[in-house]
Each structure stands twice: as C-alpha cells, then as structure tokens.
Image (cartoon, helix red, strand yellow):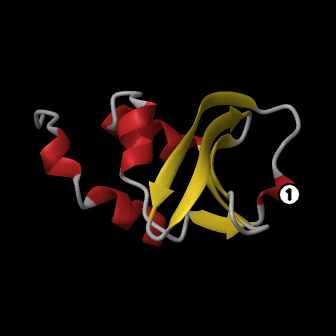
Amino acid sequence: MSTYSPKSITAEPKKLFESGNIFSYQASVLDDNRVVLYKKGKQLGDGFYIVEISSNSGGIAITAFDVEKSQSLLMSIGSQKANECLERFEYNFEHLASCLRV
C-alpha cells in the first residue's frame, strides 16, 4: 500500500477530469436535495468562481459558478469513483478544490 502525499497526487486530478466517467453540464441540473459539503470562492485560471462540492445518492458533484459570466461548470462523479476520489484526498475538500483547473 502506498503512502499518501499531496505532492504525489498533483497530476492525478487531471486524469480524473479526462476520465470518461465524469460529465460536464451546466449547473442548472443540480439536484435540489443535494448536501453541500464545501462552498468557497476561488481563483481558477483567469476567472473567479464559487466552487461547490456536494453529494447526493448518485455520487458527488463539483460545481464552479463563474461570478463574472452567467455560466457554470459541473462534474458529476458516480458513487464508486467519488469514494476513490474522496479517499485519495483524505476527504479534504479544500485540497480537492485547490487542484481544480478550468
């Protein structure tokens, strides 16, 4: 079993985003019954976004609401992949959010 190290997973989020198991949508399809686990404003690329990590019965959703434009980005991650992802980040939502790229 390998030891967890934040440096050892720096490139891993890109692989997660390129995976065929994650889909991008407008955030208008978010589940009204979701549980918000994390919500904070963050600089991503050239823009400022409100990043939300939420869960529902189907997995987790990572949403980036662009505060300057009327657009949003959403990644839905199914339950099995969500558990793997959250375990990899030791359920540290701040660290997971800091690895996001747009």
Quarter where residue 84 is shown: top left
Above or below for 5 versus 67: above
**Foreground pick, 46 / 12:** 46
Q: Would you say 98 lies left or right of 71 here?
A: left
The answer to whether one can see residue 93 in this image is yes
Above or below for 24 versus 10: below
The total of numbered circles placed on residues is 1
Residue drawn at x 75%, y 68% as measured from the top left: 71
Q: For the residue carrying disc 1, how many other residues have a C-alpha within 10 Å: few (<14), some (14-19), or many (20+)?
A: few
Looking at the rendered structure, the secondary structure element under dot 1 is helix
The answer to whether one can see residue 77 in this image is no
The extreme front residue here reads: 68
Residue drawn at x 79%, y 67% as measured from the top left: 70
Above or below for 32 versus 76: above
Residue drawn at x 73%, y 34% as measured from the top left: 56
Residue receiving disc 1: 28
Q: Quadrant of the N terminus?
A: top left
Q: Position of residue 54 (x, y in %)?
A: 66, 36
For the residue marked with disc 1, what is the amino acid? Ser
Q: Would you say 41 lies left or right of 72 here?
A: left
Residue drawn at x 68%, y 29% as measured from the top left: 36
Q: Position of residue 51 (x, y in %)?
A: 59, 46
Q: Position of residue 28 (x, y in %)?
A: 86, 57
Q: Position of residue 37 (x, y in %)?
A: 61, 27
Q: Would you say 50 lies left or right of 1 here?
A: right
Quarter where residue 27 is shown: bottom right
Q: Would you say 60 lies left or right of 1 here?
A: right
